[in-house]
């Protein structure tokens, strides 16, 4: 384990994910033990199949159409380059170096055991994510082994799923950055709005009023949102700044309406800032694979993507389109709530 030993002896202690990535490189190169080399070759995805943004070049990152996640990916690349520049060579590999590959595999496949202990667990990491998983995992302290435990009857041939996000869930930005995908209709997703900080701290009565939303939409719509039938509505309500019930009761005037109109304009600005529309993204994801096409969605020459040479079925591209589409759908849901909220009586 030469790379791991070198990293462990670094004057500045390296975090667990860096050390584990170095160990994975040792395993891939056959410098570990007899298990890890064949396992890396047979099970782990090749660099070109990874969909974590930190493994993409700038042109690919632009397809996410979201500056925050792009900046995060670039910072992660800068961090890796700063620590191990000799391992970040991408010559002959496209955008992703082997060190990026190893680090991405660690970030997307390692399991948290305690706040200080993380583990790379072969075969357990093959379980996919589900918001309603049919299995869970645990560490058997007596045997030192990980156990995959069914939560319900699992039929032969059925996918075994676990939750990557826990009960509280993850935002789509976190899902994409850490796992390279986003779920459809994620109730834990959020849109960040620009709200004057003094409103929350000093004038919470000027925030939005949930009672007004309830009055405008009715109990059925809100109950459907809370029960998971309308996850975009729920995520929109959780994204918007509502006043606590006690402060809402003392609210007077139309300051909350002014805030709602401002937030509505922010939604419009965000939607107009995308290079593609919801309908265009839906068309891309619905289109059959057209391998090698330079215009996978049949775009007009004026389309922002018409000059991008890409295989329509490339995993990174589909992941990027799904990410930005889900973000647009949530912004649209926020805009709907605010449109109804500000509508004259």
Image (cartoon, rainbow, N blue to C red):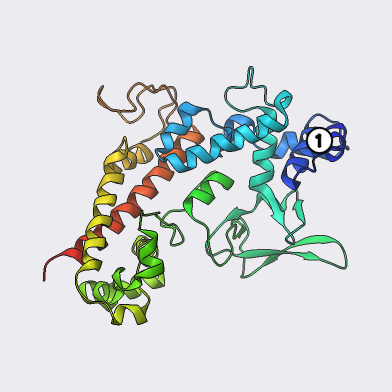
In the image, residue 63 above or below residue 223 = above
Q: Quadrant where the C terminus lies?
A: bottom left
Q: Residue at 48% of width from left, 37% of height from top? A: 70
Nearer-the-camera pick, 56 or 71: 71
List the single residue furthest toward the top. 92
Under circle 1, the secondary element is: helix
List the single residue furthest toward the left. 345
In the image, residue 275 above or below residue 149 = above
In the image, residue 239 above or below residue 102 = below
Residue 293: % across, % down: 39, 23
Residue at label 1?
Answer: 27
Nearer-the-camera pick, 124 or 72: 72
The answer to whether one can see residue 51 in this image is no
Relative to 330, 60 lies left or right: right
Tell me the quarter of the picture where residue 142 sits: bottom right
Tell me the quarter of the picture where residue 52 sits: top right
In the image, residue 246 above or below residue 100 = below
């Amino acid at each position: 384990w030469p790379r791991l030993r070198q990293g462990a002896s670094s004057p500045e202690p390296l975090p667990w994910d860096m050390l584990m990535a170095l160990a994975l490189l040792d395993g891939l190169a056959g410098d570990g033990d007899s298990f890890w080399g064949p396992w890396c070759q047979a099970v782990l995805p090749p660099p070109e199949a990874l969909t974590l943004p930190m493994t993409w070049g700038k042109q690919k990152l632009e397809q996410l159409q979201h500056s925050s996640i792009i900046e995060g990916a670039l910072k992660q690349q800068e961090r890796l380059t700063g620590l191990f520049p000799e391992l970040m060579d991408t010559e002959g590999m496209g955008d992703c170096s082997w060190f990026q590959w190893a680090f991405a595999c660690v970030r997307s496949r390692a399991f948290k055991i305690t706040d200080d202990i993380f583990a790379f667990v072969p075969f357990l990491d093959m379980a996919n994510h589900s918001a309603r998983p049919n299995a869970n995992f645990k560490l058997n302290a007596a045997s030192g082994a990980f156990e995959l435990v069914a939560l319900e009857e699992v039929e032969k041939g059925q996918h075994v799923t676990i939750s990557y996000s826990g009960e509280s869930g993850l935002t789509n930005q976190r899902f994409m950055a850490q796992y390279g995908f986003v779920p459809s209709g994620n109730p834990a997703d959020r849109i960040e709005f620009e709200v004057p900080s003094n409103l929350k701290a000093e004038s919470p009565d000027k925030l939005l009023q949930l009672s007004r939303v309830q009055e405008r939409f009715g109990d059925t719509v809100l109950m459907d949102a809370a029960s998971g039938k309308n996850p975009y509505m729920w995520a929109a309500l959780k994204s918007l700044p509502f006043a606590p019930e006690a402060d809402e009761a003392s609210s007077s005037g139309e300051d909350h309406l002014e805030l709602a109109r401002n937030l509505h304009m922010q939604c419009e600005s965000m939607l107009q800032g995308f290079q593609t529309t919801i309908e265009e993204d839906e068309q891309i994801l619905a289109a059959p694979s057209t391998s090698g096409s330079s215009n996978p969605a049949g775009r007009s020459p004026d389309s922002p993507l018409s000059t991008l040479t890409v295989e329509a079925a490339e995993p990174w591209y589909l992941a990027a389109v799904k990410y930005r589409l889900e973000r647009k759908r949530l912004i649209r849901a926020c805009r709907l709530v605010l449109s109804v909220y500000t509508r004259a009586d």
